[in-house]
Amino acid sequence: MYGLTGRNGSGKSVLLKCICGFLIPDAGKIRIFGKTKKRGEMLREAGIIIEEPAFLGKKSGIKNLEYLYGIRNRMDRKRLEETMLQVGLDPGERKPVEKYSLGMRQRLAIAQALMEDPQILILDEYLNGLDRQGAKEIRALLLSWKERGKTILLTSHSREDMEILCDQVFEMDGGKLFCRKRE
C-alpha cells in the first residue's frame, strides 16, 4: 500500500489521473507492475476513485452498481450485494442516491471501486464525508485487501492514515514527487 500526501493543489490528483490514463503527462514514464504504460493508455482492471464520483441520483445504490457492472457485460448481483455490505451499505435500501449522505455516497464509491475485484486500487481522498467509525471500518477493509495481495495507492491529508496503512509514503510538492521518510 502506497500513500501520497501533499497540500491542496500540489498535483496529487493530476498524478493519479495520469496513472489512470485520464490525462496525458507532458514528460516521464508510468510503470505499473513492471510494464511501461503507453502514452494515453487507460489503466484497466483497476478500482478508481478520483474526486467526487458521479452516480445516477434517482436510482438506488445497488441499481447504480448494477448499471456500472453491466457496462462490461458482467452481472453477479450476489457479488454486488456482498460488496455493498463490506462497505457498510444495505443493498436492499431503495432510497435514491441523491438522498444519500456524503458518507453514504463515499461508501458507494468505494463499493464501485471494489466490485470487480481489481488487482490495483487508486483512491483519491477516499475518506471524504466518513465519520470516525466509518473511516475505521474502511481502513480495516483496505488492510484486508492488502493482505489479499492487492496493490493500493491512496491519497489522504491524514497522517494517521499514512502511518496505519501505508508501506511507503510519497509527498507531492509543486508537481514534484518525493519519497517521505517514515516517522
Image (cartoon, grey):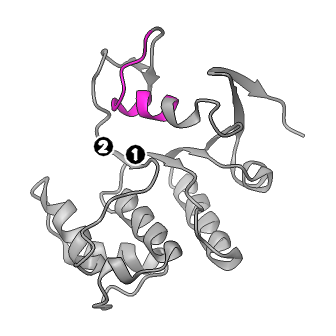
Residue at image x 62%, y 76%?
134
Residue at image x 45%, y 12%?
29
Residues 43 and 116: in front is 43
In reply to whether residue 22 is colored magenta, the answer given is yes
Instruction: List the residue tagged with mark 1.
Output: 119
Q: Amino acid at mark 1?
A: Gln
Compared with 24, 75 (above or below) is below
In reply to whether residue 112 is colored magenta, the answer given is no
Query: Which secondary structure, mark 2?
Result: loop
Query: Which secondary structure, mark 1?
Result: loop
Residues 35 and 104: in front is 104
Compared with 162, 4 (above or below) is above
Packing grade of label 1 (10 A; few <14, some 14-19, many >=20) is some
Compared with 105, 181 (above or below) is above
Q: Are marks 1 and 2 in contact (CB under 8 Å)?
A: yes
Residue at image x 17%, y 66%?
67
Q: Position of residue 143 (x, y in %)?
A: 61, 59
Instruction: List the residue tagged with mark 2.
Output: 45
Q: Amino acid at mark 2?
A: Glu
Q: Which callout, 1 or 2, points at the residue further toward the start of the chain?
A: 2
Q: Position of residue 124 (x, y in %)?
A: 53, 48
From this viewpoint, which residue is outermost toward the left? 73
Name the side, left or right, on which 109 lies relative to 182. Answer: left
Residues in magenta? 15-26
From this viewpoint, which residue is outermost toward the top? 27
Compared with 2, 38 (above or below) is above
